[in-house]
Amino acid sequence: MGGSGKQKPGIFSGIFRNTSCISCFFVILCFSLLATGCGAVGSALDWGSRGREFKSRHSDHNFCRKKSIVVCSRLLYIMCAKIQLYMRYIRRSEAIVNRIKTCEVLGNLNINTYEYINVPEITGNMEIDVKNLLELNGKGDTYKHVKAVADTNVQIAKMYGLDETNCKVSGFLHDISVVIQPKDMLNYFVNGMLFIDESEKRYPFLLHQRVSKLLSESLFKIFDPNILSSIECHTTLKDNPSESDMALFIADKLSWDQDGKPPFYDIVKKELSVSLEKASYAYINYIIDNNIILYPHQWLLQAKQYFEKFIL
């Protein structure tokens, strides 16, 4: 599930870029219909000769007419069926072309596409760049949150021997997509024909974890798969999560962006002293058992099932 570096376009993208699939299908369709027509005409002639022979033998003057009607009806049915079949091929080919084009830019989400976003100059200093991006777009509270998450994530990294630098980076970057409006996040995934969970359709802001991963690649040039994976699932977690995935997931919950201490803080903090798995599982169970989840994302449910097998 975690992202990696940019991928080069495949050979098929060049083929689709230079050749019209639809035109090819229409050519094939014409040849196919022509072949069908020729076959039908041959059948009609054959039936006609048989009809004349039968007519001479049995004096049935309506035989040829009846058989001609049957043959023409069959020909029309076959032609309509072939047209429907090739129209399906055309629609599928268009979807494939769009998918290939999307794959070429996946991970290169261009933040400049959205005119309402103020994009600062990227200096290479992670903390300063994130602060500038968020504060320039009226997200000062989010910056306080991501800084707290980064600090907490570093503490967890020390507890479990994880890469402290990676944990700090993922903490700062995990919510940078808040500068993009949820409707635009949804449109990006819809137009790109990308997987959208039912919870994300109902509450598009849940896509922010995945969009933050894309922005980390395109804007901050982060390509470490461990960092990108943890950012991508920091809200929901996922099946078979890594230690860095769980660390950021827990750090985000313990450093939540609302007033006061979260109701699950004590139980998650207690289980964190035992293992990352138990702390993650404790949080998931708490929000489900206490009905404080808007709509369960399938990644969250998959993570729950994984922990049930791992822990129980």
Image: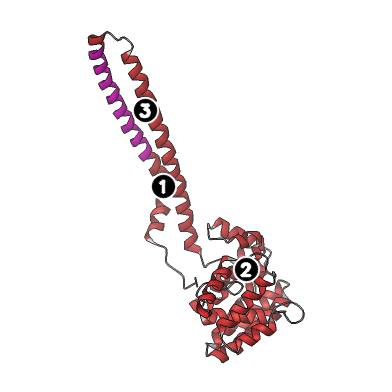
Asked whether residue 186 is in view, the answer is yes
Q: Amino acid at mark 1?
A: Cys
Q: CA distance from mark 2 to mark 1?
A: 35 Å
Which of the marked residues, 2 or 3, is nearer the chain's N terminus?
3
Tell me which amino acid carries mark 3: Leu
Instruction: Give the percent coordinates (x, y) of residue 218.
Output: 54, 71
Camera-side mark, 2 or 3: 3
Give above or below for 110 relative to 22. Answer: below
Q: 240 or 8: which is nearer to us?
A: 240
Q: Which residue is mark 3?
A: 75
Q: Which residue is mark 2?
A: 208
Q: Based on the picture, tell me whether residue 35 belongs to the magenta stretch.
A: yes
- Quarter of image, res 110: bottom right
From mark 2 to mark 3, how far is it between C-alphas?
Answer: 54 Å
Residue 219: tell me if it is visible: no
User: Label 1, on which residue?
Assistant: 21
Disc 2 secondary structure class: helix
Viewer-side residue, 238 vs 171 = 238
Report crowding for label 1: few under 14, some 14 to 19, many 20 or more residues within 10 A (C-alpha): some
| Residue toward you, 260 or 208 | 260
Q: Looking at the image, which residue is at 48% across and 57% down? A: 99
Q: Earlier in the sequence, mark 1 or mark 3?
A: 1
Residue at position x 65%, y 86% in the image: 269
- The magenta stretch is 27-54
